[in-house]
Amino acid sequence: MPVSAPRLIPETHRELKKVESILDLIGDTPLLEIRKVTYGLSSAVRIFAKLEGFNPGGSVKDRPALKMIQEGIKSGKLTRGKTIIDSTSGNTGIALAMIGRALGYPVELVLPSNVSLERKRIIHALGAKVIYSDPMEGSDGAIRLCRKILQQSPERYFKPDQYFNPMNPLAHYETTGPEIYRQTHGQITHFVAGIGTGGTIMGTGRFLKGRNSKIRIIAVEPDDALHGLEGLKHMASSIVPGIYHEEEVDEKIPASTEDAYEMVYRLSQEEGVLVGQSSGAAMHVTLQIARKLRSGTLVTVFPDFGDKYLTTNLWVGWRNLRVPAGDLKFSI
């Protein structure tokens, strides 16, 4: 029996808006119903993914990056002549580079040297200066190096400090949470998101809990310190972000690199949605939860699309792998 085409949650009709800046396009991303990967679930269980790759910088990080910069300007901490600097695994760096260029501020970014080639090229194309940290130290190494640079010339820089800036979760409280609640017509029962800085899960979760305390907030993290899930943190072995408060999460579920990768392949082959590793991890856990339910509306976040990861280990040897949905090997 053929499966009908995926449907977006309908919203009231609005004309395409005319904008004065690329920054006006941040937010209001679509919600996609996942319908093929979910085959076999109860008919009363539905899964949706918030497609944050539709933001102009290509990821969910556009939201907090803009909020942190706006607050920096408002508070007087970011003034003309200062340079924006922060540590990042890539997506926040792209967002800061884009926003800095749009507003006329120079940007310097500290990245682990093993982040994807695509992310490096995008950041360079946006004119930001890149400083690479030890790849073996991951995002924590970038945090430490960024702090060292800032200590040497504090008067020169403005550091949004995404891991400790309350504007990060506030951006999601003010935008992501309300959008999801509206797009599901208040029917959401579970919210699932990966932990990077913790901003998405904290801010969105707070808004949703404020609307309905019965909504379950589930965090996703790698199952091991040595993992291949760019953008996610294994909390027990990492510098815990100051904005992340685990007591506000109903449950934290680990995902293996292998399971996340397999889900990325399934989403691309079955749904036609190409996403990154962290999206695969979030979807894997969301599906785990959904299989235990008789009814529910689950929403997860796909932080970005997969075009930034085509040169990473995610796709090395992918043609020799099989997906559960069929016996055909991948080919290009």
Image (cartoon, rainbow, N blue to C red):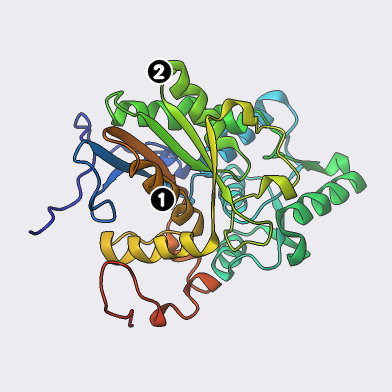
Q: Residue 87: where, in percent of width, then height?
A: 72, 50
Q: Residues within 10 Å of mark 1 (few under 14, many from 20)?
A: many
The residue depicted at 83 percent of the width and 43 percent of the height is 156
As drawn, 150 above or below 317: above
Q: Which disc, if any, is residue 106?
A: none
Q: Residue 329: where, in percent of width, then height?
A: 32, 81
The residue depicted at 88 percent of the width and 50 percent of the height is 148
The residue depicted at 35 percent of the width and 40 percent of the height is 292
As drawn, 160 above or below 6: above
Res 312 seen here: no
Q: Is disc 2 in contact with disc 1, using a CB cutoff of under 8 Å?
A: no
Q: Residues within 10 Å of mark 2 (few under 14, many from 20)?
A: some
Left or right? Give the position of 158 relative to 192: right
Q: Residue 26: where, in percent of width, then height?
A: 44, 40
Q: Earlier in the sequence, mark 2 or mark 1?
A: 2
Res 28 seen here: yes
Q: Which residue is mark 2?
A: 212
Mark 2 → mark 1, Cα distance in angstroms: 23 Å
Residue sitting farthest toward the left: 1
Q: Name the quarter where the C terminus is drawn.
A: bottom left
Q: Residue 279: where, in percent of width, then height?
A: 45, 53
Left or right? Give the position of 132 relative to 262: right
Q: Secondary structure at mark 2?
A: loop
Residue closer to the observer: 227 or 312: 227
Q: Secondary structure at mark 1?
A: helix
Q: Name the quarter where the N terminus is drawn.
A: bottom left
The residue depicted at 32 percent of the width and 38 percent of the height is 18
Tell me which amino acid carries mark 2. Asn
Tell me which amino acid carries mark 1. Met
Q: Which residue is mark 1?
A: 283
